[in-house]
Structure formats: C-alpha cells, structure tokens
Amino acid sequence: MSYYLSSTTAKYHQQVRRKRMLFVFLIAVTLLLGIYAVSKGAYQLSPNHVFQGLIGNAKGNSHLVVWNIRMPRIVAAIVAGWGLALSGLILQTLLKNPLGSPSTLGISQGAAFGAAVGIIIFNSGSVYSLYSVTMFAFFGAMAATGMILLLAKVKRLSSEAIILAGVALSSLFTSGTFLVQYFATETQVASALFWTFGDVARSGWKEIGIMTAAILIASIWVTYHRWNLNAMLSGEEAAKGLGVSVESLRLQGMIFAALVSAIITAFHGVIAFLGLLAPHIAKRIVGADHRLLIPFSCVIGAILLLLADTMGRVLIGSGSMPVGILTSFMGAPMFLYLLMRGVRQ
C-alpha cells in the first residue's frame, strides 16, 4: 500500500514538474515572439539594432521605432491577450458554459455601440477625441454587463439562458450601431467602422498602465478564489455544500470580467473570440484545475494576440492588418466546434 502511494505521489510530482516546465517554455515563447515582433514591420531592424534598442543604446530612427512604435503595441498585445483570456475563463467557469466570453455576452458589441454613439452623435468635428470615444465605449460595455447581471438576478436565469440573453443583446447593440451609422456622414461612418477593427497599436504607455492595473486586480481576485472556482465545476449545489457563496462569487466574477474586457475593448476596439479560445486551449493542456488553468490561459491569450498582431504586420508589410480580423479567423472555427459538440451531447 505504501509503495502504491509513493508511486502515485511520484507520478503526480512528475506531472507538476512537466507542467511547470511547459509554462516556462510558454513564457520563453512569448519573449522570443516579442523580440521577433520588434524587428519586423515596414522599417526592418537587424538583430543588433533590436538588441541596442532594447538596452537603450540605439539612437535616431532605431530608438524611435523600438520604444515609441513597436514596444507599446507589443506590450499592449501581451496585456490585452492576458486580460481577455482571464475574462473568458472567469465567465466560462462561473456560468459553467464553454461558450462564455465577452463576445458572446454582448460586452464587445455594447462597446462598439457606445463608440459609434460617441463618434457620430457627440462628435464636434471631423477629428474625434480618442479619450471621449474610449469613455463612450466603456459605458456601452458596462451597460451590456448591467443588463446581463440584472436579468440574471431578477429572473434567476440559468447559465444557458444567460448566454442566450447575451446573444440577444449582441444583436440589439449591433442593430443599434447600424442605425446610428445610417444617419452619419461618410467620414463618421469610416471612423466608427475603423474603431470596430481591433487594433493594439492605439495604446500608449499610459493606456497600457491603466489596463495592467485593472487586470492585475482581477488576476489577484481570481487567484484568491481559485479553490472556489474549482468547486463551481462540480455544480452550484456541490459548491454551496463546500461553503462557497455562489451568488456572491458569480456577481463579483462577472463584474471583474466585464470591467477588464470593457477597458480593453474601449482602448483597442473589438477583439473577438480570444476570450473564448485561450481558456479552451489551456484546458486541453493542463485540465480544469484553476491553480494551473489561470496562468496557462493568460499566457496563451498573450501569445495568441501577439502572434495575430505580428502576422498582421508581416503579411501587409507596410502598415498592419487589424488584429480583430485575425482573431475572428482563429476563434470562429472553435465557436462552431463547441456548438456542434454541444448538439451531439
């Protein structure tokens, strides 16, 4: 018996070491991808210029390209990918639904509607203020969240019904966006349409600091409640039997998830499906234990968004393809796969 226990313990510790090594490997992949992203673009940089730029010894164009143009968007992609993956993981666990994400709950579409209202209705000129549009987008995202939380609390909706309510709100906000655009000028329509294309290049260091602060707070919360989230996987009744305040946990988690995704969407536009995709990839690798699932989901989300942004710059050559288009191409097949798997079950 003791031999069996020691053998089982040894296998468990071996699995933990492998997963830790894999996590270190993913961190290294993120850093290497970031270094590669610094060198690629319309203005090519040699490895020496990249190294000199990163340590602060580069001068002239190299320093400007590294620290004023490329590093902000690289860090923004890592932070935004981390936050969207964390938001999607929280929603999927609390709703016990694999389709939970900011996109499927209408949060992203609410932000797009708010941005369209800010650009078209409250625009005083042809050039709109970035921060005023960001504010409108944030309020639109939080309005969608408020509606979801109100419906869930008043009507006591199931997790499946909450997803369906999110799909309905997505349609409502999308229709509202089209209606506002119908009465706009060509310039305003172009501005509103451009905003909906997710783009991590819009953030400077100040915006990145705001996003990082919000995501760190949410990360601390979800790490603190990792055991409660594990209990939620067994169902609400089982979690309540283990002493988890399910209603309070769900309300707090949805607020944190919505706040993070609203801030990211407000600064960068709609980046669809990333919050859906990253947690599912992490679950395939490490399982459903949130002690490992949380960090793996976040680093995979960072890698996916950084990879999509780098691909967009490499494919176009001059300029960049909006990252939201590429994440939609990655996430849509996963969304369809989850829907078909649900039908079979």
Image (cartoon, helix red, strand yellow):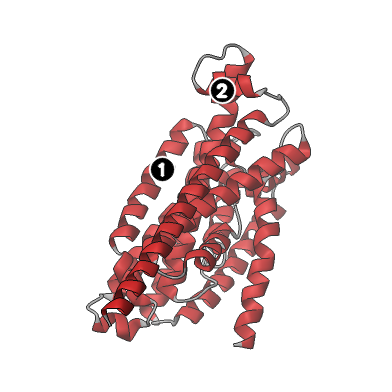
Contact between marks 1 and 2 (CB within 8 A): the answer is no
Question: Where is the C terminus found, in terms of image quarters?
Answer: bottom right
Label 1 Cα crowd, 10 Å radius (few <14 / some 14-19 / many 20+) = many
Q: Provide residue 28's location: percent of width, then percent of height.
A: 51, 43
Residue at the disc numbered 1: 212
Q: Is mark 1 on a helix, strand or loop?
A: helix
Q: Provide residue 36's location: percent of width, then percent of height.
A: 63, 34
Q: Nearer the viewer, residue 27 or 256?
A: 27
Question: Where is the N terminus found, in terms of image quarters?
Answer: bottom left
The residue shown at (64%, 24%) is: 47
The residue shown at (36%, 76%) is: 232
Q: What residue type is labelled 1?
A: Thr
Question: Which label's residue is closer to the chain start, 1 or 2?
Answer: 2
Q: Is mark 2 on a helix, strand or loop?
A: helix
- Residue 328: name its quadrant: bottom right
Q: Is residue 112 left or right of residue 142?
A: right
Q: Which amino acid does label 2 sit on?
A: Phe
Q: Is residue 178 visible?
A: no
Q: Provide residue 182's location: percent of width, then percent of height.
A: 71, 54
Q: Can residue 306 be seen in this view?
A: yes
Please give the count of numbered marks on the rendered protein: 2
Compute the Cα span from label 1 to label 2: 25 Å
Residue extending farthest left:
243
Residue extending farthest top:
59
Q: Provide residue 296's location: percent of width, then percent of height.
A: 46, 57
Q: Is residue 332 left or right of residue 151?
A: right
Q: Is residue 264 left or right of residue 198?
A: left
Q: Could you say which disc has been placed on residue 51 in the image? A: 2
Depicted 64 relative to depicted 145: above or below: above
Residue extending farthest front:
3
The residue shown at (62%, 68%) is: 171
